[in-house]
Image: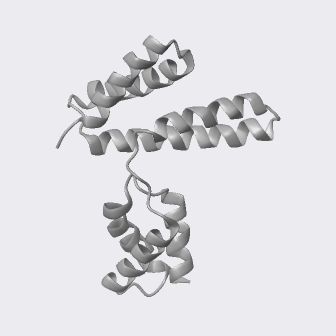
């Protein structure tokens, strides 16, 4: 495995500093910091797949914040979170299209002989191999529920 994501983010930090883009620099430093915390806690050198998990978590946190800020009428804070998501997504693998997710869901359901909602855990576990970092898990889950009901 490689740590291509970590290296490219560190490179982007220095580029954004040279450009004087404070918002981008701050967001990128947050990502680097999250990686470092994880490396210290687990006493490992992060690989790309672990970096993707952290990036997904950061995006999910920001989406939750957007919902709360919009409910409170704080549009400027919601926009800041949206802008951070755009920067984080630059380092995520290419996302699967809706059609690709639906095809994968149907393929895994037939491979696992899933019949009902009782089999959802099995289907989701198998799908995680194919969709991790490439599709929103909430969307994948909703598609599995549709297919199994």
- Against 111, residue 51 (above or below) is above
Q: Report the residue that reaches farthest toward the left.
A: 1
Q: Quadrant of the N terminus?
A: top left
Q: Quadrant of the C terminus?
A: bottom right
Q: How many marks?
A: 0
Q: Residue at x 30, y 41 (%)?
A: 50
Looking at the image, can residue 38 be seen? no
- Against 42, residue 136 (above or below) is below
Residue 119 in picture, x, y percent from top left: 42, 78
Q: Report the residue that reaches farthest toward the front.
A: 19
Q: Is residue 44 left or right of residue 93?
A: left
- Against 116, residue 124 (above or below) is above
Residue 79 in picture, x, y percent from top left: 69, 33
Q: Residue at x 50, y 79 (%)?
A: 117
Q: Residue at x 48, y 64 (%)?
A: 97
- Against 147, residue 143 (above or below) is above
Seen from the viewer's position, the closer of residues 28 and 118 is 28
Q: Report the residue that reaches farthest toward the right.
A: 73
Q: Is residue 19 left or right of residue 1?
A: right
Place residue 100 in its image quadrant.
bottom left
Place residue 43 in its image quadrant.
top left
Residue 84 in picture, x, y percent from top left: 56, 32
């Amino acid at each position: 495995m490689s740590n291509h994501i970590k290296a490219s983010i560190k490179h982007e930090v220095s580029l954004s500093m040279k450009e004087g883009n404070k918002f981008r620099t701050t967001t990128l430093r947050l990502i680097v910091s999250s990686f470092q915390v994880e490396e210290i806690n687990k006493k490992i050198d992060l690989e790309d797949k672990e970096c993707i998990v952290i990036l997904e978590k950061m995006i999910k946190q920001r989406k939750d914040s957007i919902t709360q800020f919009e409910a409170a009428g704080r549009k400027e804070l919601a926009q800041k979170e949206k802008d951070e998501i755009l920067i984080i997504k630059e380092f995520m693998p290419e996302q699967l299209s809706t059609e690709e997710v639906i095809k994968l869901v149907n393929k895994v359901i037939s491979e696992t002989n899933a019949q009902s909602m009782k089999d959802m855990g099995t289907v989701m576990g198998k799908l995680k191999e194919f969709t991790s970092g490439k599709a929103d898990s909430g969307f994948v889950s909703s598609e599995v529920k549709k297919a199994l009901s």
